[in-house]
Amino acid sequence: MTTANLRPILVVSHTGRDDSIEAALHVINQLRLAGATPVLERSERDDICAAGVETGPVLLLDEDISAADLEIVIVLGGDGTILRAAELVRRHPAPLLGINLGHVGFLAESERDDLDDAVHRAISGDYVVEERLTLAVAVEQDGEIVYETWALNEATVEKASRERMLEVLLEVDDRPLSSFGCDGVVVSTPTGSTAYGFSAGGPVIWPTVEAIMLVPLSAHALFARPLVVAPESSIGIRLLQRNAGTGVLWCDGRRTFELGRGAHVIVRRSGVPIRLARLHQGPFTDRLVQKFRLPVTGWRGDGK
Ligand SMILES: NC(=O)c1ccc[n+]([C@@H]2O[C@H](COP(=O)([O-])OP(=O)(O)OC[C@H]3O[C@@H](n4cnc5c(N)ncnc54)[C@H](O)[C@@H]3O)[C@@H](O)[C@H]2O)c1
Ligand SMILES: Nc1ncnc2c1ncn2[C@@H]1O[C@H](COP(=O)(O)OP(=O)(O)OP(=O)(O)O)[C@@H](O)[C@H]1O
């Protein structure tokens, strides 16, 4: 690809951190030197300026240019920053290229040392795009949809009152499955299976598998195993009327809604995937081992 037909490139960074701001400025300069047009969100441009540094001329997202017209999004931060960037370009073709400046950066494609190479490959179109399944999440109360959102990692229904269990009825494909008291329920995508669902004891699901996973949180029940259902399945979580407290819905730790008694949370596969730019075509097994530092050579020997 030549820069003549390269569309503008959005840079999203964790502006609460000096190293991310420094990296953002570096990337903006690299883009300009290569003849590409950098784009920032206004709030991000203001945060960078507030840190006492100049970005030079950039286009502002949703003011000078629409997300629909972006080439790619370069994300400088950890998983939280990638989840934030996903909100900006969901429903648009530009993929997310994560460069890990955070702690884990499980969803990132490159590490800090490879920053220049990653920017070069973003500009030259030298990447493949992988689509990740996302969830469509709706809350029904008294027969009416009162909230709709989506998730790349997971939707969780959690107790809002610390001292009270949440009484729920789980449904799969509109059929009742099990009812129990718990701290909450995680409904995860394969992408989210290494995040909250993993902490809750769910299986890791390879990203090429299409499925939806449910993991109860601290259920006071004899049957509360993690479940993996078909991607076409619909999951229902009903907050029973007998609940003493209320609940809360969280999606990707970012989008939230309070749930009263009788609320019915419905989770299905969304028709809108998130697109990740991949620079390395290595197996997911290697990513899992590397990010989770799994002991492939155990204390009992090197595997031979
Ligand atoms: N008990 C828990 O494990 C728990 C509780 C709340 C939220 N979370 C996770 O935090 C996510 C939000 O991330 P954040 O960075 O804004 O919050 P955060 O800063 O609290 O970080 C949560 C941790 O989850 C990791 N993470 C996020 N998505 C991941 C993924 N797909 N695979 C592997 N690890 C992943 C992050 O790297 C980070 O270390 C939520 O989507 C949820 O999955 C986990
Ligand atoms: N520009 C920003 N301003 C304020 N908060 C931000 C910004 N960018 C990211 N955050 C938030 O800061 C938190 C931590 O960011 P992030 O996840 O990127 O770093 P991390 O926790 O070090 O990395 P990881 O999630 O990979 O462990 C997230 O909740 C994220 O949404």
Image: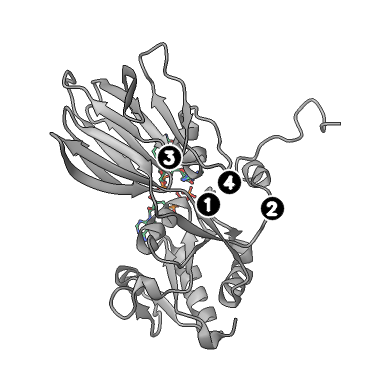
Display colour scheme: one colour
Mark 2 lies on residue: 282
Whether residue 15 appears in this view of the structure is no
Circle 3 or circle 4, nearest the eye: 3
Where residue 74 sits in the image (x, y, percent)?
49, 67
- Answer yes or no: disc 3 within 8 Å of ligand 1: no
Circle 1 or circle 2, nearest the eye: 2
Of pointers 3 and 4, the one earlier in the residue sequence: 4
Mark 1 lies on residue: 107
Q: CA distance from mark 2 to mark 4?
A: 13 Å
Of pointers 2 and 3, the one earlier in the residue sequence: 3
Circle 1 or circle 4, nearest the eye: 4
- Answer yes or no: disc 1 within 8 Å of ligand 1: yes
Q: Which quadrant, please, contains the C terminus? A: top right
Q: CA distance from mark 1 to mark 3?
A: 24 Å
The kind of residue on which mark 3 rests is Glu
Few, some or many C-alpha atoms within 10 Å of disc 3 (few <14, some 14-19, many ≥20)? Answer: few
Where residue 90 sits in the image (x, y, percent)?
38, 60
Q: Quadrant of residue 13?
A: bottom left
The kind of residue on which mark 1 rests is Leu
Of pointers 1 and 2, the one earlier in the residue sequence: 1
The kind of residue on which mark 4 rests is Thr
Mark 4 lies on residue: 208
Instruction: Judge from the rendering whether residue 133 lies leftward or rightward of residue 295; answer left or right.
Output: left
Mark 3 lies on residue: 232
Q: CA distance from mark 1 to mark 4?
A: 14 Å
Q: Secondary structure at mark 2?
A: loop
Circle 1 or circle 3, nearest the eye: 3
Instruction: Judge from the rendering whether residue 120 lies leftward or rightward of residue 199; answer left or right.
Output: right
Q: Secondary structure at mark 4?
A: loop
